[in-house]
Amino acid sequence: MHPTQNTSHFLYYIFIMQFAISGSSAIENISVDDNTATITFNGGRSYDYTVNDVTAFVTALTNVMNKQESVGSFVNKQIKSETLQKVAA
């Protein structure tokens, strides 16, 4: 093999977790990838938020959904505690 040949191959995997929220009066959908959560509110408005600890956020969201608790209240608490920080438009 010639030294100038590039044999490096980079594989990038992007995992997107999508949560369709049923029964919520505020939240329609939450999509999480890398360190960003896109929250779509009922009515179609979507906002991007950075997430410092995606695993903890997804685990907590899953627990809220499994217990059939309010996803809107959960998201509101996450924003107030700055777990979710709005990405400037």
Image (cartoon, helix red, strand yellow):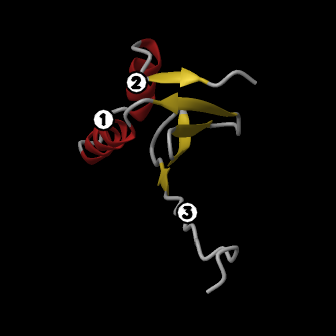
> Of 17 and 1, which appears nearest the observer?
1
The label on residue 73 is 2
| Mark 3 Cα shell of 10 Å, populated few (<14), some (14-19), many (≥20) | few
Image: 47 above or below 77: below
Label 2: state its secondary structure.
Answer: helix
| Mark 2 Cα shell of 10 Å, populated few (<14), some (14-19), many (≥20) | some
Q: Look at 37% across and 34% down and name the residue there.
A: 53
Q: Look at 33% across and 42% down and name the residue there.
A: 55
Q: Is residue 75 left or right of residue 5?
A: left
Q: Look at 40% across and 34% down and name the residue there.
A: 71
Disc 3 versus disc 2: nearer the observer: 3
Residue under label 1: 69
Q: Quadrant of residue 80?
A: top left
Q: Earlier in the sequence, mark 1 or mark 3?
A: 3
Q: Look at 47% across and 47% down and name the residue there.
A: 21
Image: 13 above or below 65: below
The residues tagged by marks 2 and 1 sit, at their Cα atoms, a distance apart of 8 Å
Picture coordinates of residue 40, whole percent (x, y): 61, 39
Q: Quadrant of residue 5?
A: bottom right
Q: Earlier in the sequence, mark 3 or mark 2?
A: 3
Picture coordinates of residue 83, whole percent (x, y): 41, 22
The single residue placed furthest to the bottom in the displayed view is 1
Q: Are marks 2 and 1 in contact (CB under 8 Å)?
A: yes
The single residue placed furthest to the front in the displayed view is 3
Picture coordinates of residue 89, whole percent (x, y): 76, 24
Label 3 sits on what residue type? Tyr
The residues tagged by marks 1 and 3 sit, at their Cα atoms, a distance apart of 35 Å
The residues tagged by marks 3 and 2 sit, at their Cα atoms, a distance apart of 34 Å
Residue under label 3: 12
Labels in figure, total:
3
Label 1 sits on what residue type? Glu
